[in-house]
Amino acid sequence: MSDAIDTSLIRAYWEREHLAESIIDALRAAGKGAQVVCASDACYTRENMDRDVLPNILWNPSVMRDSLAALRKLRDQGGATMFYGHDPAQWETIPRAPAPVL
C-alpha cells in the first residue's frame, strides 16, 4: 500500500487503483489486540479479494492487484477483520449497533 498516516489506533492509507485517490482505514481495537480494515473502494467484495477479480471500472489494474494482495495479507496473515466496500453478503452478517463488531 502507498502513503500512510499512522497513530496508535488508526492508520489511513491512500490508494491509487480504483480512483486516482482512495482511502483505506485500518483500525486497532484498543485493549483487544484486533485490527479492523475498512477496505472502501479498494476491495468491493470478498470474492474480489479471494479470486483477485478486478472491477470493470478502475484507474490502475496493476496497482489495484498490489493493493488486493496487501489487504489479503492483512486479513490472512495478520488476522484483520476485513470490511469490504460493497459486499451485500457480508453486510447481512455484520452486527448492528449497539452490538460490538469484535
Image (cartoon, rainbow, N blue to C red):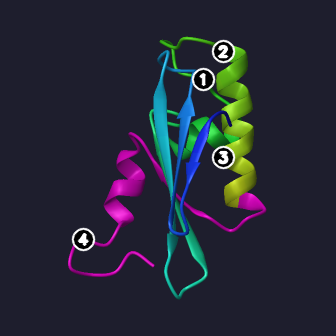
Mark 4, Cα crowd under 10 Å, few <14 / some 14-19 / many 20+, is few
Coordinates of residue 57 in the picture (x, y in percent): 47, 12
- The numbered mark at residue 96 is 4
> Which residue position holds label 3?
71
Coordinates of residue 53 in the picture (x, y in percent): 63, 28
Precedes in sequence: disc 4 or disc 3 = 3
Q: Is residue 62 left or right of residue 14?
A: right
Q: What residue type is disc 1 on?
A: Leu
Precedes in sequence: disc 4 or disc 1 = 1
Q: Is residue 99 magenta?
A: yes
Coordinates of residue 25 in the picture (x, y in percent): 48, 50
Whole-number angstrom distance, CA of label 1 to CA of label 2? 7 Å
Whole-number angstrom distance, CA of label 4 to CA of label 2? 34 Å
Whole-number angstrom distance, CA of label 3 to CA of label 2? 15 Å
Precedes in sequence: disc 4 or disc 2 = 2
Image marks 4 and 2: residues in contact by CB distance under 8 Å:
no
> Which residue position holds label 2?
61
Q: Could you tell me how many numbered marks the image carries?
A: 4
Discs 1/2, front: 2
Q: What residue type is disc 4 on?
A: Arg
Q: Which residues are magenta?
A: 76-102
Q: Quadrant of residue 91?
A: bottom left
Name the residue located 68 percent from the left edge and 37 percent from the top edge.
1
Q: What residue type is disc 2 on?
A: Pro
> Which residue position holds label 1?
54
Viewer-side residue, 99 vs 19: 19
Precedes in sequence: disc 1 or disc 2 = 1
